[in-house]
Structures are given as structure tokens and as C-alpha cells.
Image (cartoon, grey):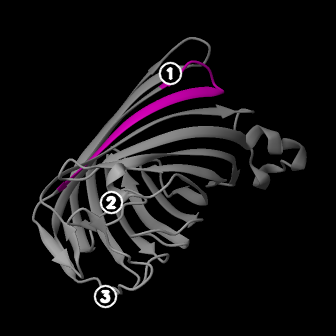
């Protein structure tokens, strides 16, 4: 499969505010094996270029430190919101999912991101090297997920689209700095309207910054809406918007929203 996605990050809780945009072109494959009890095991992998404007894509909550001390971005330092063309980076992912039944699934994902050239903009540095993010989580669905309001399903069918999940994300910068980890314990609801699939999810984000940031643990709050529409059996369009509200300020960090918005298309061969 080939996935082309344009996406942007809006860090509105920092003065400026800083922005990052990219167009990704990922080439990959998905393999799945059926198991008993309607279970399955799947492996998915992809790699490709990321054409970057502004900052490179980075781990949520990352603050920018210089000389061992984080800049007070939310108090005195300002950034330009302009996002000039920067370079072509390389990104990828490798994911494994084990689903012992139709209601329960476990997933682990590695998301490498290679910065191809060191560059500095407004005091923020993207350093040559490999950024890493590791994700592990579990999801439980209360029903079979077969909710389609265009086919006459009503409120009595809502439970079939409800789910809960707990997902931990851990990140390292390209110089090897441990950035921290956060766990999303979110609830959600997925449904169809004819061919359009919609997924809504929200909940707390329990964040533990790395020691480099000199920031305390905190609980942020976030939510996401995702759309998926099959134009044909082999061409699927998608869009998503995730907003997370940070509840505490500190050196290099501020109270307010961060947004990640993206849209694209996947060609399945």
C-alpha cells in the first residue's frame, strides 16, 4: 500500500506559536493471520519520505533546552509562525497487533523518524539523527462495532460502537535524550453513516516528562475525531484532528491547546 498524508502541528500553548507541517509518502505492507475465536494476528510496516516545513514532527510535550536549561517559551520568548521549506526527512513505523477475540486487542508500535540535516529556526533545533517513539496499548470493544445509522440503527445500537483503550507512548530525541512518556486512557465511539466511518475518542493524558525538562508530572486532557471513506475497494481517504489541552505551565511549556490535523489517501494494491 501507499499512503500520502498532509498534516500539521499547531503548538498554541507556546508563544509565537511554533508550527510544523509535512507531506508524507509511506510505502508499506499489512499481513494478517486468522486465529480461533474470531481472533487475529497482524503485522504492518511502512517507510518513506517526509517533506518538512517549519519544525520536524516531534514527541508530544517536548520542550527545547539549551545548555541544560529549558527556554521559557510560554513567558518571554516568541517564535515566528512562518513555516519555510526545510528538508526531506525519513519516517516509518512497524506495528504488531494481537487480537485474541473480536472484543480485545493488544498492539505495539515503533515509530522511527530520521532527521537528515541539523537546522535551527527561532532557537529551536532539529538535530541530525534518529528520533524514536514506542507505543504499547490495549483496546476493549463492548460490541461488534457494526453501527450504521444510514441503515436504520438507532440509539439502542450505540453500545455496539463503544470502546475503551489505554495506550502508553515513550519518546527519545535524535541525540538520545529521553523525552518522557504519557498514557492515554480514553473512551470512544465508532460508527458508520453509509460508507463513511467516524471515530470519536477522548480522555485524560497522564504525562511524565523526561528529567531534561525539569517539569513535574501532570494530567492533560485530549480528544480526537477520525474519518475514513472508501472511494473504491482499493482507494481510501481519511482525515483526523487531535486536540490536547495542557493544564500546567513551566519552563519551556505553557497552558493551552496543541493540535494535530491531517488528511490523506491510501492506495491498497
Locate the C terminus and report the quarter of the image it occupies: top left
188 or 226, nearer to the observer: 188
> Quick one: label 2, few (<14), some, or many (20+) residues within 10 Å?
some
Q: Earlier along the polypeptide chain: callout 2 or callout 3?
A: 2
Q: Residue furthest top?
A: 36
The residue at which mark 2 appears reads as 58
Q: CA distance from mark 2 to mark 3?
A: 18 Å
Determine crowd level at label 3: few under 14, some 14-19, many 20+ residues with C-alpha closer than 10 A.
few
Location of mark 3 (residue): 82
What residue is shown at x 84% (from left), y 50% (from top)? 152
- Is mark 2 in CB contact (under 8 Å) with mark 1? no
Q: Secondary structure at mark 3?
A: loop
Task: Tell me how far mark 1 sits from mark 3, CA to CA.
Answer: 46 Å
- Region of the chain picked out in magenta, as a range: 98-114
- Please identify the quarter of the rendering in which residue 36 is found: top right
Q: CA distance from mark 2 to mark 1?
A: 32 Å
For the point 56% across and 28% down, which residue is it? Answer: 105
The reply, left or right, for residue 269 in relation to residue 230 is: left
- Looking at the image, which residue is at 33% across and 85% down? 79
Give 94 or 56, whichever is nearer the viewer.
56
> Which of the 4 image quadrants contains residue 6?
bottom left
Q: In terms of secondary structure, what is the magenta stretch mainly?
A: strand
Picture coordinates of residue 1, whole percent (x, y): 32, 45
The image position of residue 95, as x and y in percent, is 37, 35
Q: Splitting the image into 4 quarters, where does residue 10 fall?
A: bottom left
Frontmost residue, 60 versus 227: 60
Q: Earlier in the sequence, mark 1 or mark 3?
A: 1
| Residue at 49% from the left image edge and 55% from the top image edge | 216
Could you say which disc has been placed on residue 40 in the image? 1
Do tag 1 and tag 3 residues touch (Cβ < 8 Å)? no
Using the image, determine if residue 103 lies above or below residue 2: above
Residue 74 drawn at (x, y percent): 44, 78
Amino acid at each position: 500500500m501507499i499512503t500520502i498524508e498532509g498534516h500539521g502541528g499547531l503548538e498554541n500553548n507556546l508563544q509565537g506559536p511554533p508550527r510544523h507541517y509535512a507531506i508524507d509518502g509511506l510505502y508499506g505492507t499489512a499481513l494478517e493471520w486468522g486465529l480461533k475465536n474470531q481472533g487475529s494476528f497482524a503485522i504492518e510496516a511502512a517507510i518513506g519520505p517526509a517533506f518538512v516545513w517549519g519544525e520536524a514532527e516531534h514527541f508530544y510535550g517536548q520542550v527545547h533546552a539549551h545548555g541544560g536549561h529549558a527556554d521559557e517559551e510560554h513567558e518571554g520568548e516568541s517564535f515566528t509562525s512562518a513555516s519555510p521549506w526545510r528538508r526531506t526527512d525519513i519516517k516509518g513505523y512497524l506495528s504488531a497487533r494481537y487480537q485474541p477475540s473480536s472484543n480485545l486487542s493488544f498492539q505495539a508500535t515503533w515509530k522511527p523518524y530520521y532527521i537528515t540535516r541539523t537546522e535551527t529556526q527561532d532557537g529551536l533545533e532539529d538535530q541530525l539523527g534518529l528520533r524514536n517513539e514506542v507505543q504499547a496499548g490495549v483496546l476493549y470493544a463492548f460490541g461488534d462495532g457494526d453501527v450504521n445509522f444510514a441503515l436504520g440503527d438507532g440509539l439502542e445500537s450505540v453500545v455496539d460502537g463503544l470502546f475503551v483503550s489505554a495506550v502508553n507512548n515513550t519518546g527519545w530525541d535524535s541525540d538520545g535524550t529521553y523525552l518522557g512518556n504519557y498514557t492515554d486512557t480514553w473512551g470512544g465511539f465508532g460508527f458508520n453513516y453509509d460508507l463513511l466511518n467516524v471515530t470519536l475518542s477522548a480522555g485524560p493524558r497522564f504525562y511524565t516528562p523526561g528529567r531534561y525538562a525539569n517539569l513535574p508530572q501532570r494530567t492533560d486532557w485530549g480528544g480526537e475525531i477520525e474519518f475514513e471513506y472508501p472511494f473504491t475497494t482499493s482507494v481510501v481517504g481519511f482525515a483526523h484532528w487531535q486536540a490536547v489541552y495542557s493544564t500546567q505551565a513551566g519552563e519551556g511549556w505553557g497552558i493551552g491547546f496543541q493540535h494535530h490535523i491531517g488528511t490523506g489517501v491510501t492506495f491498497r494494491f
